[in-house]
Amino acid sequence: MTIKIVKRSVQGASQFDHSFASVQNRVRKAPYSSGNYPEQVWLGMLQLPKPPKKEFFMAVDGDNLLGRIGANIPPDYPGKGYVGFFEVDVTHSDHEKIAKELLEQAESWLKEEGASEVIGPINYNTWFSYRFRVDQSDDRFFVWEPINPPEYVTYFKNFGFKTNESYSSTLSDKNYKFADATKKYYDRTIKDGFTFHAFDSEEFLLENLESIFTLSLEGFSKNYLYEAITFPEFQALYVPLFKKFDFSTSHMAKSPEGEPAAFSFTFKSGNDLVFKSIVVNPNFQGKGLSNALIHCCAKMGHEQGLVDYISALFKRDSITANNLQAKTETLWEHEYQLFSKKID
């Protein structure tokens, strides 16, 4: 048995890409396969024009595909490099060696491109999938969160990666309690002339997509490792999500003059309401809009029979996370981490 690392720029995209895109579905075993993407999604990502500096590697043994990794240089962060698209067949007898060789190849390429620090897992940038789930507290897996075998975390740590940032998702008790706790903010903002509009149809979402895009750029611009994207890129990312999840509990707040001031992204997950994002235009911060939006979403979720709520994928100790988690009792928590390593 001979493990070989194949490089996209050497083999050529026409031969490489379909094999690379198939690796996840080949090596992931249940329950960690529940979040797998179709091969066509991976093909589309490989063929995106950005980022301009990127490379991909596969571990193979003859016709057997054993793992993969991607590496890229983020244009807005000189000296940093990202690794992502990471997969390894954890059932293979040499799985640790495969992981190490993939990480070595990616790090070597990043070093050649001028990076002095590698961060991962990140698939290109933080608009796409990033982070590993690091806890094994329960057997719940959701398609909206990172899903990975626990071995992936071990591979990164054994290679010298340390925790870079921490995130969490928590299930908290009772939407109606949440709605009651935030009603005063809703009442105050209504009195101030703000109006609230549910994302109750695909037409509403598409009509307001450009406003959501503008608010997202303004609201996320201070997020860790933020990179701006274009409106067509935003459309390509989010329009498919509107078809995949039920966002009807999400809301937009508009100013007394009718200007989009804030929005919340919430969606249904089983019998729970997931709070994914709350974004407020900087010009309207400090007016209670975040809590008012929480009230609208939690109230509608309760009316639709959604019992509890999940604060999803928030950075630990962020204002929004603390705001969401302080209202009621936490029933469970999932933890995620982003890792980094200095390149020698």
Image (cartoon, rainbow, N blue to C red):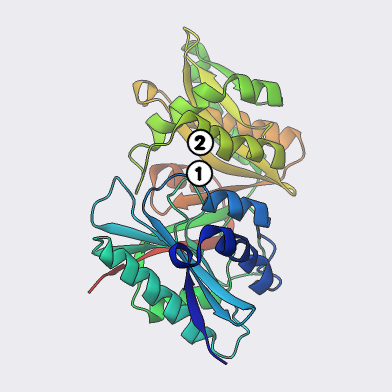
Front: mark 1 or 2: 2
Q: Is residue 58 above or below residue 244?
A: below
Q: Is residue 160 above or below residue 258?
A: below
Q: Is residue 92 left or right of residue 30?
A: left
Expressed as whole percent of the image width and height from the top left, the position of residue 260 reads 49, 18
The residues tagged by marks 1 and 2 sit, at their Cα atoms, a distance apart of 29 Å
Query: In terms of secondary structure, where does tag 2 sit?
Result: helix
Q: Quadrant of the C terminus?
A: bottom left
Tag 1–tag 2 contact (CB < 8 Å) = no
Q: Residue furthest top?
A: 257
Q: Quadrant of the N terminus?
A: bottom right
Q: Looking at numbered disc 2 in the image, what kind of residue is underneath it?
A: Glu
Which kind of residue does numbered mark 1 sit on?
Leu
Residue in front for this viewpoint, 327 or 41:
41
Density class for disc 2 (Cα within 10 Å; few <14, some 14-19, many ≥20) is few
Residue depicted at 62% across the width and 45% down the height = 274
Question: Which numbered disc flags the more N-terminal residue, 1 or 2?
Answer: 2
Does 217 sit above or below residue 130? above
Q: Who's the residue at 53% across and 15% down the image?
A: 190
Task: Count neighbours of disc 1 (C-alpha within 10 A) and say few if under 14, some if 14 to 19, many if 20 or more.
Answer: many
Residue 97: x and y in percent read 47, 86
Q: Secondary structure at mark 1?
A: helix
Between residue 66 and residue 234, name the one nearer to us: 66
Instruction: In the rendered view, tell whether residue 44 sits above or below residue 281.
Output: below
Relative to residue 271, is residue 298 drawn left or right? left
Q: In the figure, residue 115 lies in which quadrant?
A: bottom left
296 and 84: which one is in front?
84
Residue position for label 1:
324
Which quadrant of the figure has residue 220? top left
- Residue position marked by numbered label 2 in the rendering: 233
